[in-house]
Amino acid sequence: MDEHLSDRLFAASGIASVALMLAGVGIGAAGGRQFATITSTPTEIADAVAHPVGTAVWTGAYLELISFGFFLAFAVWACAKLGGGLLGQIARAAATSYVTVSVASLAVMDTIAYRSGHGMGLQLATTMITLNEALFVVTWFLSAVFLVVVGSLALQAGRRALGWSAVAIAAITLVLTPISLDNLAQMANILWLAWIVAASVALARRRVGRVGAVAVARS
């Protein structure tokens, strides 16, 4: 496959991962998906699991699941574009762990959704919701590890904006998570998704620029 075309496909994978993730959450929410957390009251949790979920919730969950496949393709490509090596291996391991734990979190969420409206007790529901949020928070720390390592790769490759933005978002995530789990930390997760899109565009565009420069030099 042509390298330029390959870059564009992998960059599109990064953007698609974010688009599918947000679309999945939006469709699920529109279909009545409940977002109970560890800070929800017993009444809120009981209400969240009192009714069966509809098709839209499962459609949203399916899109979220697919999004992680696209993210993994993007992450492996980004590490290769930035130089690979030992840091690249660590970043790929962090990305793989991030996807693994994220899928496990989705599985717990789907279990809650499947049991909703079918006599799920409050104690079991509370335990499952707590487990799901614990897994979700772990993904934030794994994303921070990925950002720090891939940010270091970017700095070594001379991509200062990409590198420093990755390190900054990782720092924000690590600081805000223990301070405000269900509020400010959620906003930091949005920065992570925005970075994926920005990195996808930047890495593909940089390659296009270099190819253009080589073509001009040869002419």
Image (cartoon, rainbow, N blue to C red):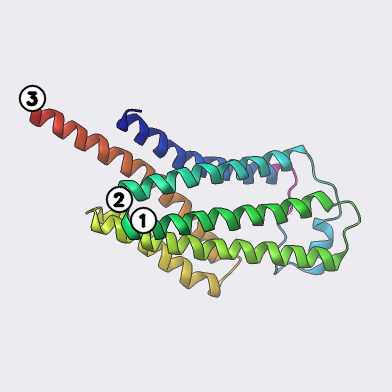
First to last magenta residue range: 30-34
Q: Residue at x 39, y 44 (%)?
A: 77
Examine the image and state in which quarter residue 90 appears.
bottom left
- Residue 88 as seen in the image, left or right of residue 26: left
Q: Establish if 162 lies above or below 58.
A: below
Query: Disc 3 or 1, which lies upstream in sequence?
Result: 1
Report, in whole angstroms, how far the alpha carbon at label 2 lies from the one at label 3: 28 Å
- Viewer-nearest residue: 66 or 181: 66
* Residue named by callout 3: 219
Q: What element carries label 1?
A: helix
Q: The disc labelled 1 sits on which kind of residue?
A: Gly
* Badge number at residue 88: 1
Q: Residue at x 73, y 67 (%)?
A: 40
Report, in whole angstroms, how far the alpha carbon at label 2 lies from the one at label 1: 8 Å
Report the predominant secondary structure element of the magenta stretch: loop
Q: Which residue sits furthest bottom?
A: 179
Pointer 2 and pointer 1: residues touching (CB < 8 Å)?
yes
Q: Residue at x 41, y 38 (%)?
A: 10
* Residue named by callout 2: 82
The location of residue 69, given as percent across then percent down, is: 54, 43
Q: Which residue sits furthest right?
A: 119
Q: Which residue is drawn at 67% across and 44% down?
A: 61
